[in-house]
């Protein structure tokens, strides 16, 4: 079976192993790749994501798929000295990079890295103030399960926020974006990481990710309330959010 772009579809059982490999292979070059692929715009998306999160001083925040610590670093001023971030990721190589960066940035003692699968969070019910997940949900095999877990571990009045690739809303942009994904991105991947497979995986995972309204309804199905989303860059990415009331 192939996708719209002609890439071979990855069977679900293979997928988890592949996610592991993809991110282990790219962990060290991850930032460089992000910058090259997005022209640096991922930094703006991430800053906006955290700035509009409404996360409070003193909050205990779980940054899921926290990988190299990008979001965690941005969260630190927002949560202040009393707050704490748990960086959760399924891949230890990504967590190691994140851990080093957070220590270099002077945040020792204010964060913790824990290897975990978003589908099975190692926390008690009602224990976390806010959950962020940037560019992670599309890699999760059972996305609904991940959202259900977010709901479970959030405290009442806690908030879940997902920043993820989504569906562009204009046909012109759609054409440009498809051209970029299909023609340019794999070349960048080949050039920077000498790794076409990772890029095929990336394009495919974006293509298969639910659109804005579908993801919103999945938030609602998880039990989250006051759910909504904001499109950034014409829907190339979207921020979804919902509360546990
Ligand atoms: N949040 C970071 C950022 O925005 O730069 C990293 C995003 S990176 C594209 C995706 C991350 O999701 C990887 O670090 C990967 O290991 C992690 N991941 C994939 N599947 C996961 C799962 N089931 N549970 C937790 N993390 C997962």
Image (cartoon, grey):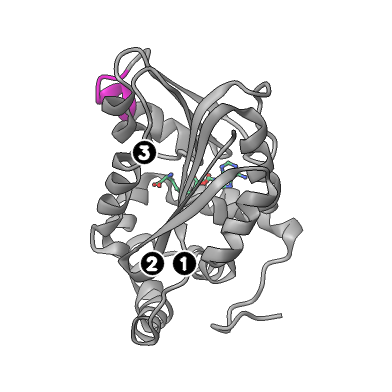
Q: Contact (CB < 8 A) between labels 2 and 1?
A: yes
Range shown magenta:
101-107
Please tell me whether residue 80 is drawn above or below residue 139 in the rendered image. above
- Where residue 83 appears, as percent x and y from the top left, is 38, 18
Which residue is rendered at x = 61% and y = 79% of the image? 3
Please tell me whether residue 157 is drawn above or below residue 32 in the rendered image. above
**Sequence-first tag of 3 and 1:** 3
Residue under pointer 2: 189
Residue 71's label in the rendered image is 3
Category of crowding for the residue at label 3, using alpha-carbon neighbours closer than 10 angstroms: few (below 14), some (14–19), many (at least 20): many
Does the numbered disc 3 mark a residue whose Cβ is under 8 Å from ligand 1?
Answer: yes
- Where residue 120 appears, as percent x and y from the top left, is 70, 35
Q: Locate residue 52: give its quadrant.
A: top left
**Sequence-first tag of 3 and 2:** 3
Which residue is rendered at x = 67% and y = 43% of the image? 223
Which residue is rendered at x = 35% and y = 50% of the image? 29
Q: Secondary structure at mark 3?
A: helix
Residue under pointer 1: 199
Please tell me whether residue 97 is drawn above or below residue 232 in the rendered image. above
Counting every numbered tag in the picture gives: 3
Q: Locate residue 111: give its quadrant.
A: top left
103 inside magenta stretch: yes
Which residue is rendered at x = 57% and y = 30% of the image? 115
């Amino acid at each position: 079976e192939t996708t719209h772009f002609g890439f071979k579809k990855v069977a679900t059982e293979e997928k988890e192993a592949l996610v592991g490999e993809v991110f282990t292979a790219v962990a060290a070059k991850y930032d460089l790749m992000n910058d090259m692929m997005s022209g640096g715009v991922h930094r703006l998306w991430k800053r906006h994501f955290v700035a509009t999160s409404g996360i409070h001083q003193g909050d205990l925040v779980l940054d899921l798929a926290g990988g190299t610590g990008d979001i965690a670093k941005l969260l630190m001023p927002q949560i202040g000295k009393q707050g704490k971030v748990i960086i959760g990721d399924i891949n230890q190589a990504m967590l190691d990079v994140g851990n080093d960066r957070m220590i270099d940035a002077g945040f020792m003692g204010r964060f913790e890295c824990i290897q975990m699968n978003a589908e099975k969070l190692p926390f008690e019910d009602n224990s976390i103030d806010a959950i962020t997940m940037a560019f992670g949900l599309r890699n999760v095999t059972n996305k609904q399960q991940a959202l259900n877990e977010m709901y479970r571990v959030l405290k009442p009045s806690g908030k879940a926020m997902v920043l993820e690739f989504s569906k562009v809303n204009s046909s012109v942009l759609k054409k440009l974006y498809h051209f970029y994904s299909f023609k340019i991105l794999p070349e960048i991947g080949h050039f920077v990481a000498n790794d076409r497979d990772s890029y095929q995986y990336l394009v495919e995972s974006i293509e298969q990710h639910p659109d804005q309204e579908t993801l919103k309804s999945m938030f609602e199905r998880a039990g989250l309330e006051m759910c909504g989303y904001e499109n950034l860059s014409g829907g190339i990415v979207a921020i979804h959010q919902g509360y546990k009331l």
